[in-house]
Amino acid sequence: MPHFHHQFTFTFHKLLISVCMALMIFPSTGNAEYGDVVINNYSDAAGMRPVIFPHWFHRVRFRCKVCHADLGFKFQAGGNKINMLKIIDGEYCGACHNGEIAWSVENCDLCHSAKPGTPTQVHESTLQKLIIGGKKDKKEAQ
Amino acid sequence: MNKLLTTASFNKFCLLIFFLGLALVSGVHISDSLAADPNAFNRLMKPKSERNPPPAKDGIHDPQNETTFVLQPPREQFSTLPTGKSGNYVDWVKALEEGKISPRYDLTDPSVEPVVMDLNIVREVKGSMPNVVYPHKQHTEWLDCSNCHPAIFIPQKGANNISMASIILGEKCGVCHGKVAFPIADCRRCHSSKKE
C-alpha cells in the first residue's frame, strides 16, 4: 500500500509538471487587440507567417474612409484578395507601404508576424466572444 | 505511512512553490496557472491585467519573429487617449472630438476636411429597450457615404430590417460594431433615447 501511494504521488507530480509546463508554453490565447485582423489567404501555403493588420494603429493616422472607400478595402477579413504583386504595384497596402507614406515592402516580417497556421479572422470580434459556439464560428468571424 | 504522506505533501509543496516562482519569473500571470481551478472567479472572462497586451504576449503574434518586438505595444499609443468601456478600452469618438488624434481624411493631403452630415435617425425598438438614435455626424467624421449606402443600408426610411441577431452575426451595424467600432455589449451608446 505505501508503495502504491508513492507511485500515485509520482504520477501526480508528472501530471502537475505537464500541466504547469503546458500553461507556461501555451499561455491563454485570444488576447490580441480588439480589431486586429489576421489575413491568411495565401501566407501559410507560401511558407510565410500570416499577416496581422492592427486597426488601432492605423485609425489614429487615417480615417476609415481612406482605406475602405478610396483604396477599396472591403469590410471583410480575407475578403480582399491581396497579394504581394498588387502591393508592389501600389494597390491595397502598397498605396502607403511604398517607402513614401509608410515603410516599404522589404520589411516582410513587420506584417507577416502571426504564428504559423493562425486562421483568417477579426480578433476579439463578437462572434469569437460568444461563449457557446465561439470556437466553431472562429473561422467565420469575419 | 505517516512519514510517507508527510514527504509526499512536502514534495507537492516544494513543487508548487517552484512553479509559482517560475511563473512569476517568466512573466506568466498567476491567473493562467490557476486556470484549471473549477471555482476560479470569472472563469469565462478575461481579467483586467490581460487587456491590451504587447504583441509578443497577445496570442496571435509569433514571439519567434524578431520584428514582433519592434511593433508598437497598444498601451503605449492608448496612454494619451480617453479611455472607453470595452473593445480597445479607448473612446475613439471622444479622442477625435478632443483632437487627441487627427487621422487624415485623404491619403496624401493632411489638410482635407471630412464631409460631415449632421442628421440623427431614430429607430423605435421593441420591448423595454430605449430607442436607437443613429448619429450621422460621428459616422461621417470617419466614413464616406459609399461605405454604408446602399450596400449595407438602403438610404430610405423603413427599408432596412435590422435585428440584434443579425448585428451579432456581423450584418448591418455589426459589419463594424463588434469587430472594430465599439462592441455590441455597449448597448446604451445606441439604445440612448428614452421612450415616451
Image: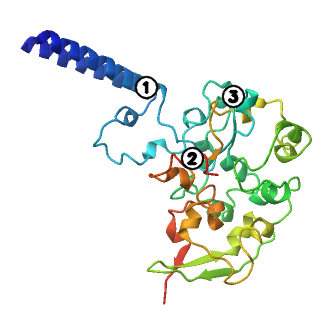
State the mark number for residue B24. none
Q: Residue furthest bottom?
A: B196
Q: Say what secondary structure mark 3 lies in.
A: helix
Amino acid at circle 3: Thr
The span from disc 2 to disc 1 (Cα, nearest Å) is 23 Å
Q: Are marks 2 and 1 on the same chain?
A: yes
* Residue B61, image x, y percentages: 62, 34
Q: Check disc 1 and give the amino acid type.
A: Ala
Cα–Cα span, label 3 and label 2: 26 Å
Q: Residues within 10 Å of mark 2 (few under 14, many from 20)?
A: many
Q: Chain of mark 1?
A: A
Which labelled disc corresponds to residue A22? 1
> Which part of the image, by quadrant, shows the N terminus of chain B?
top left
Q: Quick one: which residue is furthest to the right in this view?
A: A89
Please say if the residues under marks 3 and 2 sit with CB atoms less than 8 Å apart: no
Badge 2 is on which residue? A138
Left or right? Give the position of A99 relative to A131: right
